[in-house]
């Protein structure tokens, strides 16, 4: 890599002092002696590059001097110079060849050449010879040394000649302005000059004059200014448009006279031009501003000495005495000044305080006067409001009285007097909707699908007179729907018994629907015999109307056996098919019975309706009867879609004990299923209630007052009365025994409290790992509400928790000591069994049923179990076994969803709802398994609720839903406009922290003692005495056990029935916040030394506990490991 040019890259190296160049050369020689090579990156390469650049610059300067010398030198001097140049050229060629061959260049030779050239150049500059130089000559070749001495001699000889000529004082010739190469050729021609001229290097003595940067800069600025001026004029004269007189309107004119309109109407390009034009207009101002700033900088930077001669004065040196006097005077002046400033400030503050005091006094007086005036105004307006409210309340009471008395004429008159826009709008809206429903009823009755079934004794009403009033409030809506009446009696082919009066009325209502070509919902309360009334309808149609079907009855799987038994009992002559079983059995039924059509009634389930749709949907059904019809509340469900799309029937009837479970649109879905022509859209129903208030600009929920509620009740009854029949047991069945329901609050055990707190606080449960003693969290606990419910029921639902508390999973007293509900059942069930009562216990979770089975085995209770996994045939057998007169089974364990529908368990007189359902009607269905027709004893229902827990919120929500049902179906009120946000807010409120309430109310909520429990359970005084005796025996047994096995508890504490905090393992006793901090520390710093696993050689029980367990195993050999699969029946 060649070094850069000396003229371009390093113009200042030739001017370096000699001592610095010597240092560079010495350093280069030292590195070469150390074996350094030139690789382009190290220090040696950089030093050699600097020396080469210096050599090139020295050679160029020497060549220039030689050229000047040759122009004036003698032939001998020129000959010597040429020889020297040739010698240098030969040496340079040799060095280049060595470099091309890869041989490194000699730093010593280069240093000698540079040293020689530096010495020669310094001698020429000082007009000195080589003999006058005191410094020793550098070691060079002898030939080069001789040539150099001759060259120097020739140079000094020429210089002496020139000085001698100048001493003669000849008149100087006029110097030329510029010396060119041609001037060298002009002069005396010598003969010997022609021979050397061919070998002379012809170089110009002076370079051409360069460009002046200042001139270039001025010309550039002039061009820029000229361009800016032209562009400014171009933008000023740019034509935007022409006016009416064809005059050109320029951009500059528009900016000066109509800037805002121009800017608003300008395009994107014109906006850019306007910005450029305004910037060019500021050019002169910017130039002037820049000049002012520069002049200001110049003034600021000007030396102080130029201002005046004061800066040149010399300060007189002060003595110590003068300095002290000056300091004293300055201090005195400073104190006086501070004093004056302080006094001035105090005077100002005093004036401000005086003004503020005056201002406060004035405002206080003004406020007192305004207060008196305001009180007088408030009293006046309050008096006016009281009078107006008294008159409004009086008018409202009169309207409510008229509304309750069904005096619609008087009510409308009072409405006109009151000028109440809300009530008027509500009446108008509901009246128009009732009129539309009435017309829809007529269309339904005139449907040609019913023409083939026209009864002979139909008496048509006068439809024209019924629809003349367009206001809609005087139309007899019920009479329009049931205009054909028929007196009915129990059919003769119904031989199972005698119908009750209310059941005959239900039959009459269903026959009226049939005669008037309408469908309906039989919504009698559970236990009033909806099954029997349906059978009476089928037998009546077969006997009186000669309508042999076919009738399709869709029932739940758990009740299909009960339906078959009821048909056998009440209508044995009716040909029926029970359509169920495996696919092969169902195909056989299709081929042998259904295809030939020799049947009247087909009983099947919801699942088979969907699975065997191709076979069952081909039949044109006369009646489609849906038992537990509240399953049709979801209009988008698979069952609803299949029935609507594929199945055809002339009439539809829905049987349900809970027509309203969550909200009124669900009831509307049932009505839409049975009467799609009348109730064609749920949107119209919502508009009926919401439209009167949605147009008033009110976005929040509109609260209805008592009068509006009563008005909507009346109108809602008019809608539901023709199509829905609901009777309550307390109204129609006077002989049915009473039903007493009690809510029993249960306390949490210490283990439940710890787990409950962990779940709410951290969203997880802690447990010990399986191999070591470390702490771990239980996985898969996403639904926080569900996990809290599990903890309230029993902590052993979590297998990890049971592994810590009961490692061997043995059925012992831990089953009830760890759960408040099980502890309460451990006190209740012995008393109920001793007094001859039979118990139904309903659960939400099958895991709790598993633990309850273990508890029953532990205490020796004979029990049965029915849940969703129980087969249909087994269900019928379980019911027969439990209802048998001499049944040995005391407890029946049922799941709320599977065992609460259509089962007859009248032999039980006690119902225990272990955990409440979100849907209160599921619990009501469960209660009515025992409280129904045929029950001869008073039924007691006990609902177990854990205090200060999520279960209290669930019960409150269920009660809220029941309140809606009672007001809509039984009283008719509708005020439910809950949205998705409301439901989410309610769920968030369930998880609100109630730890403060638990801490504050922990002492007040005392545990339910035995006496209070006996009062709840007793049905007579004899039972109360029996319960007290059982409690005393239990207490004596506990005391005897404590005496036999000793007190092995910590610190002598008495063992209680519920597990206490001091009995818990360390994993549940310690504060987990500290444990979390330890986890964070171990995460950052590592866990350190590997922990040793603790090996225990015992079974984890104390001696007393082992003795008690041994005795219990000896006494009850049936107590085995709870994880062994046990049979359902024993």
Image (cartoon, helix red, strand yellow):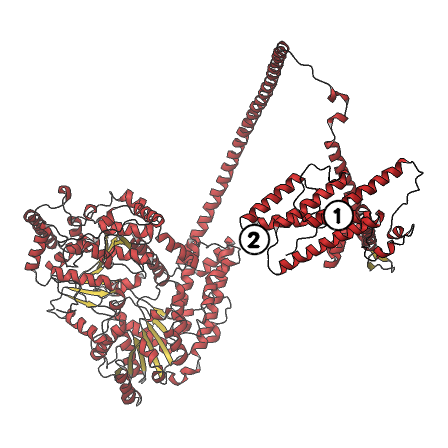
481 over 1055 or under it: above or below: below
Q: CA distance from mark 2 to mark 1?
A: 30 Å
Coordinates of residue 336 in the picture (x, y in percent) = 61, 14
Kindly indicate the quadrant of the structure image that contains residue 488.
Answer: bottom left
Q: Residues within 10 Å of mark 1 (few under 14, many from 20)?
A: some
Q: Quadrant of the N terminus?
A: bottom right
Determine the residue located farthest toward the top in the rendered image.
321
337 over 670 or under it: above or below: above
Kindly indicate the quadrant of the structure image that contains residue 479.
Answer: bottom left
Residue toward you, 630 or 415: 630
In-image side of 685 versus 1026 (left or right): right
In-image side of 772 versus 1100 (left or right): right
| Residue 621 visible in the shown view | yes
Q: Secondary structure at mark 2?
A: loop
| Residue 487 visible in the shown view | no
49 over 1052 or under it: above or below: below
The residue labelled by disc 1 is 62
Residue drawn at 50 percent across, 34 percent down: 375
Marked residue nearer the N-terminal end (2 or 1): 2
Q: In the image, which disc is placed on residue 367?
A: none
Q: Quadrant of the C terminus?
A: bottom left
Coordinates of residue 419 in the picture (x, y in percent) = 52, 54
Coordinates of residue 444 in the picture (x, y in percent) = 43, 77
Q: Secondary structure at mark 1?
A: helix
The residue labelled by disc 2 is 37
Q: How many marks?
A: 2
Labelled pair 2, 1 in contact (Cβ < 8 Å): no
Residue toward you, 1018 or 901: 901
224 over 481 or under it: above or below: above
Kindly indicate the quadrant of the structure image that contains residue 850.
Answer: bottom left
């Amino acid at each position: 890599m060649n070094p850069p040019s000396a003229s371009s890259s390093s113009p200042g190296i030739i001017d370096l002092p000699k001592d610095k160049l010597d240092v560079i050369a010495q350093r280069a020689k030292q590195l070469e002696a150390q074996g350094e090579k030139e690789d382009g990156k190290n220090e040696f390469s950089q030093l050699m590059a600097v020396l080469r650049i210096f050599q090139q610059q020295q050679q160029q300067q020497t060549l220039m001097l030689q050229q000047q010398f040759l122009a004036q030198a003698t032939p001998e001097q020129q000959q010597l110079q040429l020889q020297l140049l040739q010698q240098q050229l030969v040496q340079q060629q040799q060095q280049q060849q060595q470099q091309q061959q890869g041989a490194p260049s000699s730093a010593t030779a280069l240093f000698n050449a540079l040293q020689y050239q530096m010495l020669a150049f310094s001698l020429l500059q000082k007009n000195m010879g080589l003999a006058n130089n005191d410094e020793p000559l550098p070691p060079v070749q002898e030939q080069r040394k001789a040539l150099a001495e001759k060259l120097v001699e020739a140079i000094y000889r020429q210089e002496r000649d020139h000085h001698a000529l100048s001493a003669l004082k000849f008149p100087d010739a006029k110097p030329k302005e510029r010396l060119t190469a041609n001037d060298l050729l002009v002069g005396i021609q010598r003969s010997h000059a022609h021979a050397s001229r061919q070998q002379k290097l012809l170089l110009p003595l002076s370079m051409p004059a360069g460009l002046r940067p200042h001139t270039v800069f001025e010309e550039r600025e002039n061009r820029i200014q000229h361009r800016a001026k032209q562009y400014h004029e171009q933008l000023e004269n740019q034509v935007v448009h022409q006016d009416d007189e064809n005059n050109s309107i320029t951009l500059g004119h528009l900016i000066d006279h109509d800037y805002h309109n121009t800017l608003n109407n300008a395009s994107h390009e014109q906006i850019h031009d306007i910005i450029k034009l305004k910037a060019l207009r500021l050019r002169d101002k910017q130039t002037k501003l820049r000049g002012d700033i520069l002049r200001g900088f110049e003034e600021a930077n000007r030396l102080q000495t130029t201002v005046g001669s004061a800066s040149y004065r010399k300060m007189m040196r002060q003595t110590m005495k003068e300095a002290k006097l000056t300091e004293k005077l300055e201090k005195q002046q400073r104190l006086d000044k501070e004093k004056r400033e302080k006094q001035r400030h105090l005077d100002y503050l005093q004036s401000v305080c005086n003004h503020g005091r005056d201002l406060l006094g004035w405002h206080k007086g003004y406020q007192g006067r305004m207060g008196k005036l305001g009180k007088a105004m408030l009293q006046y307006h309050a008096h006016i409001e009281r009078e107006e409210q008294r008159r409004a309340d009086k008018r409202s009471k009169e309207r409510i009285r008229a509304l309750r008395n069904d005096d619609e004429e008087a009510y409308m008159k009072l409405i006109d007097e009151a000028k109440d826009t809300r009530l008027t709008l509500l009446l108008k809206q509901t009246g128009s909707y009732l009129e539309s429903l009435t017309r829809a009823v007529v269309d339904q009755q005139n449907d040609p699908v019913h023409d083939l079934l026209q009864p002979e004794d139909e008496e048509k009403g006068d439809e024209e007179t019924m629809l003349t009033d367009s206001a809609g409030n005087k139309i007899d809506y019920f009479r329009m729907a049931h205009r054909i009446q028929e007196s009915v009696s129990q059919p003769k082919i119904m031989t199972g018994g005698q119908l009750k009066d209310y059941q005959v009325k239900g039959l009459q209502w269903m026959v009226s629907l049939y005669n008037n070509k309408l469908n309906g919902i039989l919504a009698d309360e559970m236990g009033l015999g909806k099954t029997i009334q349906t059978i009476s309808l089928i037998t009546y149609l077969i006997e009186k109307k000669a309508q042999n079907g076919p009738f399709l009855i869709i029932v739940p799987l758990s009740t299909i056996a009960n339906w078959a038994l009821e048909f056998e009992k009440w209508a044995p002559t009716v040909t029926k098919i029970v359509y169920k079983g495996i696919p092969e059995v169902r195909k056989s039924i299709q081929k042998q019975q259904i295809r030939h059509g020799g049947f009247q009634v087909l009983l099947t389930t919801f699942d088979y309706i969907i699975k065997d749709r191709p076979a069952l949907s081909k039949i044109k059904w006369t009646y489609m009867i849906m038992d537990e019809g509240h399953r049709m509340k979801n209009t988008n469900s698979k069952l609803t879609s299949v029935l609507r799309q594929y199945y055809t029937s002339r009439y539809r009837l829905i049987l349900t004990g809970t027509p309203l479970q969550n909200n009124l649109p669900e009831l509307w879905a049932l009505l839409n299923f049975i009467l799609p022509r009348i109730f064609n859209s749920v949107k119209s129903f919502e508009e009926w209630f919401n439209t009167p208030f949605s147009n008033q600009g009110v976005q929040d929920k509109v609260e209805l007052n008592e009068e509006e509620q009563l008005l909507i009740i009346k109108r809602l009854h008019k809608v539901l009365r023709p199509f829905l029949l609901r009777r309550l047991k307390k109204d129609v069945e006077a002989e049915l025994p009473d039903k007493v329901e009690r809510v029993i609050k249960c306390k949490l055990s210490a283990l439940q409290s710890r787990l409950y707190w962990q779940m709410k606080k951290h969203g997880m449960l802690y447990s010990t790992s399986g191999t070591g003693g470390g702490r771990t969290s239980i996985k898969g606990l996403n639904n926080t509400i569900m996990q809290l419910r599990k903890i309230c029921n029993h902590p052993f639902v979590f297998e990890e928790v049971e592994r810590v508390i009961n490692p061997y999973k043995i059925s012992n007293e831990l089953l009830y000591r760890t759960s408040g509900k099980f502890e309460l059942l451990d006190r209740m069930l012995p008393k109920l069994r001793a007094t001859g009562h039979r118990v139904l216990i309903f659960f939400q979770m099958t895991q709790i049923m598993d633990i309850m089975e273990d508890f029953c085995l532990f205490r020796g209770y004979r029990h049965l179990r029915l849940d969703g996994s129980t087969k249909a045939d087994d269900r019928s057998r379980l019911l027969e076994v439990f209802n048998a007169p001499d049944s040995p089974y005391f407890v029946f364990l049922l799941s709320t969803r599977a065992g609460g529908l259509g089962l007859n368990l009248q032999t039980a007189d006690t119902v225990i709802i272990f955990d409440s359902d979100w849907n209160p009607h599921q619990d009501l269905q469960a209660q009515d398994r025992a409280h129904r027709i045929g029950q001869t004893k008073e039924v007691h229902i006990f609902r177990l609720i854990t205090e200060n827990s999520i279960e209290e919120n669930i019960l409150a929500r269920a009660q809220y839903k029941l309140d809606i049902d009672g007001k809509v179906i039984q009283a008719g009120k509708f005020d439910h406009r809950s949205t998705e946000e409301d439901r989410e807010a309610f769920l968030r409120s369930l998880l609100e922290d109630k730890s403060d309430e638990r801490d504050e109310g922990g002492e007040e909520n005392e545990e339910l003692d035995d006496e209070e429990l006996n009062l709840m359970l007793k049905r007579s005084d004899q039972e109360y005495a029996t319960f007290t005796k059982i409690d005393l025996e239990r207490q004596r047994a506990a005391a005897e056990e404590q005496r036999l096995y000793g007190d092995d508890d910590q610190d002598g504490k008495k063992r209680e029935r519920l597990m206490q905090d001091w009995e818990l393992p360390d994993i549940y006793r310690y504060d987990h916040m500290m444990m979390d901090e330890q986890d964070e520390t171990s995460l950052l710093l590592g866990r350190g030394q590997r922990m040793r696993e603790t090996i225990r050689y015992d079974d984890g029980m104390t001696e007393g506990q082992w003795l008690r367990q041994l005795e219990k195993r000896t006494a009850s050999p049936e107590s085995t490991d709870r994880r062994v699969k046990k049979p359902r029946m024993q």
